[in-house]
Image (cartoon, rainbow, N blue to C red):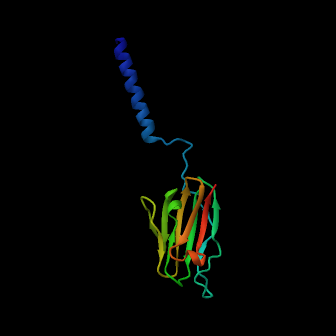
Amino acid sequence: MTRGHHRLRTGLIFTALLGAALMFGAPSHAIDLAKGRQDLPEIVLGDTNGNDFAVPVKDITMEGGKSYRLNITSNGGKEYKFMAPEFFRNVWLNQIVVNHLEIHPYGAPHHLEFDDAGTISVEFVPIRTGTFKWWIEGLEEKGMVGTLTVK
C-alpha cells in the first residue's frame, strides 16, 4: 500500500468514526433544560372581591439558564391582554398550556389574552439577563404592571 493510499484510508476511517459518534451518541454532559422546572409566584389578575385591577404579585425574580413555570390567572372581571414582549423574546419557550392543552410555539407570542376566568401556564428557560416589564394593555394606569427580572 502506498503512503497516499494509507492516508486516504486513515482519513476515511476517521470520518466514518466521527460521523457515527455524532449520529449515535449525545455528549454525556448534555441536559434537558425543560426538566426540573420550578414554579414561580403566580400572577393573578383581579380578585374575587370585585377589584378587577388587583395584582398581588407584580415583580418576580429568577435565574438565567433554569427552567420555570409561570402561571398567569384571570379572575374574569375584565378582558386582560398580558403584554411582556421583551421578556418573551429573551427566553427559550418550551410550551404554553391552557386547560391541559399544550401549545409549542416556534417563537415569542405577541401577548396572552384572557376573555374569561382561567389560567395560562408558560414554561420557559430565560436566556438573557435583565429586567423586563409586563403590563395589561390599557390598564397600566390602574396599577396592572410589573417586572420579570432575570439574574
Query: Split into 4 quadrants, where in the image is the N terminus?
Result: top left
Residue at coordinates 49% horizontally, 58% vertically from top-left? 89
Instruction: Classify 98 as above or below 46.
Output: above
Instruction: Classify 88 as above or below 50.
Output: above
Residue furthest to the bottom: 50
Residue at coordinates 48% horizontally, 66% vertically from top-left? 96
Q: How many marks?
A: 0
Query: Split into 4 quadrants, where in the image is the C terminus?
Result: bottom right
Residue 114 image point, x, y percent: 48, 77
Residue furthest to the front: 141
Which of the pair 67/7 is nearer the observer? Answer: 67
Residue at coordinates 62% horizontally, 66% vertically from top-left? 40
Which of the pair 72/8 is nearer the observer? Answer: 72
Residue 130 image point, x, y percent: 60, 56
Residue 127 image point, x, y percent: 55, 53
Q: On the image, which quarter does residue 142 sit in?
A: bottom right
Residue at coordinates 55% horizontally, 49% vertically from top-left? 31
Residue 75 image point, x, y percent: 56, 82
Please indicate whether residue 147 sits to the left or right of residue 91 in the image: right
